[in-house]
Image (tube, grey):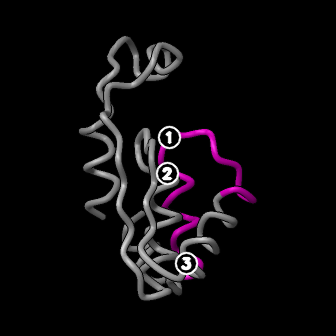
Amino acid sequence: MVSAVAALAPQDAYMLFAAHVPGWLSEPEMQALFELGREAPGPVVEIGAFMGRSTCCLGWGSRLGGQKCYSVDPHQGSPEHIDMLKGTVGTYPQFARTIAL
């Protein structure tokens, strides 16, 4: 998948990549976050990242807009995440893999 993403224009690549990251954002929400990041007049700060789906959208947009994106999350998960994470609640390992690409 990484090679397929690399072949796309940056304004299109984030959507393909983010769609493979676990999370609840819809496609229109991902597009909105990308645009907000791209049009931001200064650095972007995200509070609550889960596994990085929204971070991908905000980060790729802010990068194209010449800004930085910071994400704050304790990565402890919450009770509603337990089923999705198969009994664990630590989300940092997946988040780190997501933002490393």
**Which callout, 2 or 1, points to the residue nearer the camera?**
2
- Which residue is most to the front? 42
Residue 7 sits in which quadrant? Answer: bottom left
Q: Which residue is mark 2?
A: 53
Secondary structure found at label 3? loop
Give x and y (percent) for residue 88.
Answer: 32, 16
Pick whichever, 11 or 35, lies toward us: 35
**Which of the numbered marks, if any, corresponds to residue 22?**
1
**Which of the numbered marks, if any, corresponds to residue 82?**
none
Q: Are marks 3 and 2 in contact (CB under 8 Å)?
A: no
Q: Which residue is mark 3?
A: 40
14 vs 79: above or below: below
Describe residue 88's horizontal placement relative to residue 42 as left or right: left
**Which callout, 3 or 1, points to the residue nearer the camera?**
3
User: Residue, x 53% and y 87% (percent of image)?
Assistant: 9
User: Residue, x 48% and y 21% (percent of image)?
Assistant: 81
Residue 38 part of the magenta segment: no
Chain-order first, disc 2 or disc 1: 1
Chain-order first, disc 3 or disc 1: 1
Q: Quadrant of the N terminus?
A: bottom left
4 vs 33: above or below: below
**Which callout, 3 or 2, points to the residue nearer the camera?**
3
Type of the residue with mark 2: Arg
Secondary structure found at label 1? loop
Type of the residue with mark 1: Pro
Secondary structure found at label 2? helix
| Range covered by the magenta-colored residues | 11-29
Pick whichever, 34 or 47, lies toward us: 47
Q: Are marks 2 and 1 in contact (CB under 8 Å)?
A: yes
